[in-house]
Image (tube, rainbow, N blue to C red):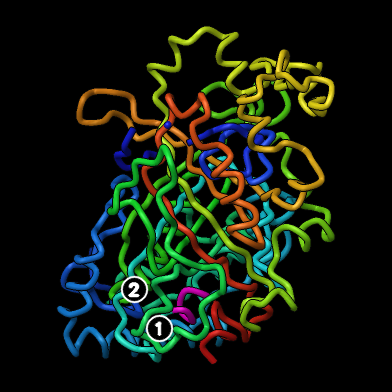
């Protein structure tokens, strides 16, 4: 899967709790459709699988103003029909083993207190998209989120799409065959600070720490690649699974939201073993907190009661997305020893420069002057491994991206970084500020992304994304 054009380095080391970091040690780490809930808006953007379409905030506003009364009626009628179709068994539920093979566990269960997709390990293929909403009022927003929930539930659970009759278009794109596999896709939905403006009467419900992502030192942010009302991540082991989900969601939400930016990513297999590598050749994600440790996730990732957040936000998590271009042609001319000193790790094994294996703990107290691991090495700045910085760890979920060439004929590739945490200031931003000016910034350039709040989980078949916020 390809990515849209990016701008030319913050840090990409896996040890970082920073979104710009790619090192493994990171602790912060167009057509209207009869069965669509929405008709096409005047300036709607197509979610084409091979085209990463970006639009400006002004375009989104123009689209909202241009929508006709017919479009609104189509959206409301379609949303009701889409919800009713699945609620009454419009899709056959999967039974037993499916195309994924007998005993294959789901990437992440759909229902639960949390969006378990947040914790799921990165799969081979991913797509991140941010959307501008084109609905006009709170009622339409509720219908949009209900529709999004219905589609996500079906796409992750699998089954056979309901027939729509011989005169209508097919109920499904068909690229996965007649029956969707169960458990082969994970979906994560978040909301941006702009959702809590005056449009929907939600200003009082904004998560306390949610704001537009600022520009940090060494950033080169492009407005058309930043922010959004809603974020969506899809990940799976096969490209056609992700593309199928994108097309399905685009079809059923057409006229209700439009793509602001989209970037596709991939996760490499272990080479030869251990943590997957980023496109600088170093392992990415070595020192993540244990996502299977519920106590650790409650301490670092999930918003809980008593944290000063709105009641509806309990069970959610702050999501940071950073789009980071790597200047690989320049990086490939740097000596290996210099590369390793910038990261603080051996490229081949992933071990800290004072260790032997990937998961060895660097011994900073016995290297106070940085003779072995330089004081400005990425892993040392990102995660000093002190009692004072232990609470700054993040759950890092990063992917590589390749967008072909830029307008000057240079390779356009890098890191599609995301991370999750309880507190943006305490965790991600603390690490980000420590990394300002590190040596790696000469070879990386963050150009987009945003801050979002990953919504609490959809608890059961009667629940939907954002219900507690909008009820």
**Above-or-below relation of 203 to 335:** below
Q: Dominant secondary structure of the magenta stretch?
A: helix
Most distant residue in the front direction? 369
The answer, for residue 360, to whether it is visible in the render is no
Q: Secondary structure at mark 1?
A: helix
Q: Position of residue 130 (x, y in %)?
A: 39, 60
Q: Position of residue 345 (x, y in %)?
A: 68, 20
* Number of other residues with Cα within 10 Å of mark 1, as a class: few under 14, some 14 to 19, many 20 or more: some
Q: Secondary structure at mark 2?
A: strand
What residue is disc 1 on? 141
- Indicate the quadrant where residue 462 lies: bottom right
What residue is disc 2 on? 133
The answer, for residue 3, to whether it is visible in the render is yes
Question: Looking at the image, how many numbered discs can be counted on the residues?
Answer: 2
- Looking at the picture, tell me which residue is in the foreground, 322 or 382: 382
Q: Position of residue 335 (x, y in %)?
A: 52, 7
Magenta residue check for 70: no
Mark 1 or mark 2, which is nearer the start of the sequence? 2
Q: Residue at x 28, y 47 (%)?
A: 51
Q: Residue at x 65, y 58 (%)?
A: 421
Q: Residue at x 68, y 16 (%)?
A: 346
- Looking at the picture, tell me which residue is in the foreground, 92 or 445: 445
What are the residue bounds of the magenta stretch?
Answer: 145-149
* Number of other residues with Cα within 10 Å of mark 2, as a class: few under 14, some 14 to 19, many 20 or more: many
Circles 2 and 1: CB atoms closer than 8 Å:
yes
**Above-or-below relation of 369 to 267:** above
- Indicate the quadrant where residue 285 lies: top right
- Looking at the picture, tell me which residue is in the foreground, 425 or 272: 425
For marks 2 and 1, give the CA distance. Answer: 8 Å
């Amino acid at each position: 899967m390809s990515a849209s054009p990016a701008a030319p380095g913050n840090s990409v080391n896996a040890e970082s709790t920073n979104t710009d970091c790619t090192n493994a040690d990171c602790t912060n780490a167009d057509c209207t459709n009869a069965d669509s809930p929405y008709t096409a808006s005047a300036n709607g953007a197509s979610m084409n699988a091979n085209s990463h379409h970006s639009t400006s905030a002004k375009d989104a506003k123009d689209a909202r103003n241009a929508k006709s009364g017919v479009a609104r009626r189509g959206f409301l009628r379609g949303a009701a029909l889409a919800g009713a179709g699945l609620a009454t068994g419009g899709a056959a539920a999967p039974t037993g083993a499916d195309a994924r093979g007998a005993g294959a566990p789901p990437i992440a269960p759909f229902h639960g207190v949390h969006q378990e997709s947040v914790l799921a390990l990165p799969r081979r293929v991913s797509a991140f998209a941010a959307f501008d909403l084109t609905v006009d009022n709170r009622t339409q927003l509720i219908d949009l989120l209900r529709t999004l929930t219905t589609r996500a539930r079906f796409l992750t659970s699998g089954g056979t799409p309901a027939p729509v009759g011989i005169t209508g278009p097919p109920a499904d794109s068909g690229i996965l065959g007649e029956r969707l596999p169960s458990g082969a896709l994970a979906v994560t939905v978040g909301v941006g600070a702009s959702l809590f403006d005056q449009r929907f009467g939600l200003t009082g419900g904004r998560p306390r720490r949610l704001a537009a992502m600022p520009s940090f030192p060494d950033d080169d942010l492009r407005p058309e690649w930043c922010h959004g009302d809603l974020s969506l991540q899809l990940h799976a082991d096969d490209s056609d699974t992700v593309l199928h989900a994108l097309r399905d969601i685009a079809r059923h939400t057409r006229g209700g939201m439009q793509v602001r930016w989209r970037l596709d990513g991939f996760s490499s297999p272990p080479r030869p073993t251990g943590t997957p590598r980023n496109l600088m050749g170093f392992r990415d994600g070595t020192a993540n907190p244990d996502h299977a440790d519920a106590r650790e996730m409650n301490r670092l990732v999930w918003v809980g009661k008593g944290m000063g957040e709105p009641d509806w936000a309990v069970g959610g998590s702050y999501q940071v997305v950073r789009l980071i271009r790597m200047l690989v042609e320049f990086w490939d001319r740097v000596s290996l020893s210099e590369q390793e000193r910038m990261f603080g790790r051996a490229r081949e094994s992933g071990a800290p420069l004072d260790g032997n294996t990937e998961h060895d703990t660097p011994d900073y107290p016995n290297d106070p002057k940085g003779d072995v691991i330089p004081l400005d090495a990425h892993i040392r700045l990102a995660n000093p491994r002190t009692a004072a910085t232990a609470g700054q760890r993040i759950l890092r979920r990063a992917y590589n991206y390749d967008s072909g060439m830029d307008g000057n004929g240079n390779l356009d590739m890098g890191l599609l970084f995301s991370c999750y945490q309880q507190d943006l200031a305490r965790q991600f931003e603390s690490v980000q500020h420590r990394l300002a000016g590190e040596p790696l910034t000469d070879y990386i350039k963050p150009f987009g992304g945003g801050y979002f709040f990953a919504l609490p989980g959809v608890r059961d078949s009667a629940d939907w994304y954002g219900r507690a916020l909008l009820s």
